[in-house]
Image (cartoon, helix red, strand yellow):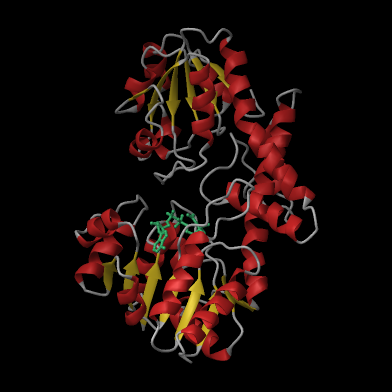
Amino acid sequence: MNIAVIGVGYVGLVTGGCLAQLGMNVICMDVDEDKIKKLKNGIVPIYEPGLENIVRENHSLKRLNFTTSIKEAVKHAEVIFIAVGTPPLQDDSADLKYVYQVAREIANHMEDYKVIVCKSTVPVGTGQWIKSEIKTILQQRTKAFSFDVVSNPEFLREGTAVKDFLKPDRIVIGTEGETALNIMKRIYNVQIQLDIPIVVANIETAEMIKYASNAFLATKISYINEIADMCDFCNADISVVSKAMGLDSRIGPKFLNPGPGYGGSCFPKDTKALVNIGKNLGYIPKIAESTVEVNYNQPRIMFEKIKNTIGNLENKTIAILGIAFKPETDDIREAPAINIIKMLLDNEVKIKAFDQKAMENAKKAYPDFSIEYCSDIYSTCEDSDCIVLITEWKDFMSLDFSKLKSIVRTPIFIDLRNVYEPGYVKSFGFLYKGVGRN
Ligand code: NAD
């Protein structure tokens, strides 16, 4: 099957690469000329485990091609996936200008039947808007091609995106017609053979499923963070609390790890967008609103924890381990580390930092940050007054605390991911603070 993917970011490139891997002929289109040039030369512009091999292999087999021409992409494909960004606007609603632009361009260039699949996370009603806009443009062009619009929200997680795409928990297909549904089932035939559940719904339901799922997961995180922050004020240990909670099969153990707050390109914007969607419907989603508020406060609470532990921040050097919003990604969008670093810099702290993959993005996005980026864990921690672990990269989970003790200026370890047993770190002579346990 001939497929086009418009927007070659985390979702678009994974979608394009994986569909090519499943044997489809895929063309990936992006307006970013530099990105397309790199991809044509076998350079994958983002870090995502397993993706580089898939992209290179399928590109060399000519099953995966790249272009900056939407006309070429539309001409090539029977099915067009829209995977452009939907970043937040000032009022927290999703900015749909890229989606709108792509829908109009598809309508301007289509010359036969197409299935237009929206993979971008978009507010309820967007699929119907795409449908009516394409219809209007085709009428203006006096063309009567038929087409179908499908909502196929993506649930992949950065860091495990390839695995998540190929073997998701479920596939949601929001559609109005049998033809499009059958085409989508052909695209996902391998997953269907693996017994992965397919949820078929109308377009609006599919759009709502994505926001409801992300906001629920974000709520779980804000909830456990709130409980952890309370544990900090009493003699309760959040690790034991969350373990016991998770053993209840109605609750489940996932997303009950406290930390500095959720980040990334999805949870922050999607929770805010859900609040906005609700308000536009005349309804105030109070739980989502509180989730957003708790998450907004969490990096400040972490900053206060650091400040209160160290005492006077003046002339202090802090070693930051991890900048990415989570391990196995170079993505720093809405990363809690960024907010914490900002607050520390505002307090004249000297920052040394190390992250396995995200330092280049941090340098590019925050050129004004006065940070000494280091090449490894131990040079980062050398002569520091406090080590703050923010992203739980695997390498940070087996630190040599004897070595650290011998190179730091002051042995303070603040573990914002509760990676270590407090007693273990303390046994090396460190003062230890976790989130909701000390
Ligand atoms: P991204 O910012 O990494 O990539 C978006 C790409 O779209 C960019 O390369 C940009 O140049 C391109 N683009 C913008 N306008 C274009 C146009 N007119 N024509 C062609 N290309 C254009 O975004 P992302 O993280 O891949 O997210 C894409 C969508 O998927 C968003 O709606 C997001 O909410 C959703 N989503 C993201 C994730 C995730 O983990 N990143 C997971 C699930 C869903």
Q: Is residue 123 above or below residue 256?
A: below
Q: Is residue 175 above or below residue 91?
A: below
- Expressed as whole percent of the image width and height from the top left, the position of residue 433 reads 59, 22
Q: Quadrant of residue 61?
A: bottom left
Image quarter where the N terminus lies is bottom left
Q: Quadrant of residue 283?
A: bottom right
**Residue at 36% across / 15% down in the picture?**
382
- Expressed as whole percent of the image width and height from the top left, the position of residue 308 reads 62, 14
Image quarter where the C terminus lies is top right
Q: Is residue 324 above or below residue 133?
A: above
Question: For this view, does 219 lie left or right of residue 399?
Answer: right
Front position in the image: 317 or 100: 100
Q: Is residue 142 above or below residue 353?
A: below
Q: How many marks?
A: 0
- Expressed as whole percent of the image width and height from the top left, the position of residue 11 reads 44, 60
Question: For this view, does 327 lie left or right of residue 380?
Answer: right
- Expressed as whole percent of the image width and height from the top left, the position of residue 408 reads 40, 13
Front position in the image: 90 or 307: 90
Instruction: Please say whether residue 434 is visible from this viewpoint.
Output: no
* Quarter of image, ligand 1: bottom left
Question: For this view, does 101 lie left or right of residue 38?
Answer: right
**Residue at 57% across / 90% down in the picture?**
178
**Residue at 54% across / 81% down in the picture?**
136
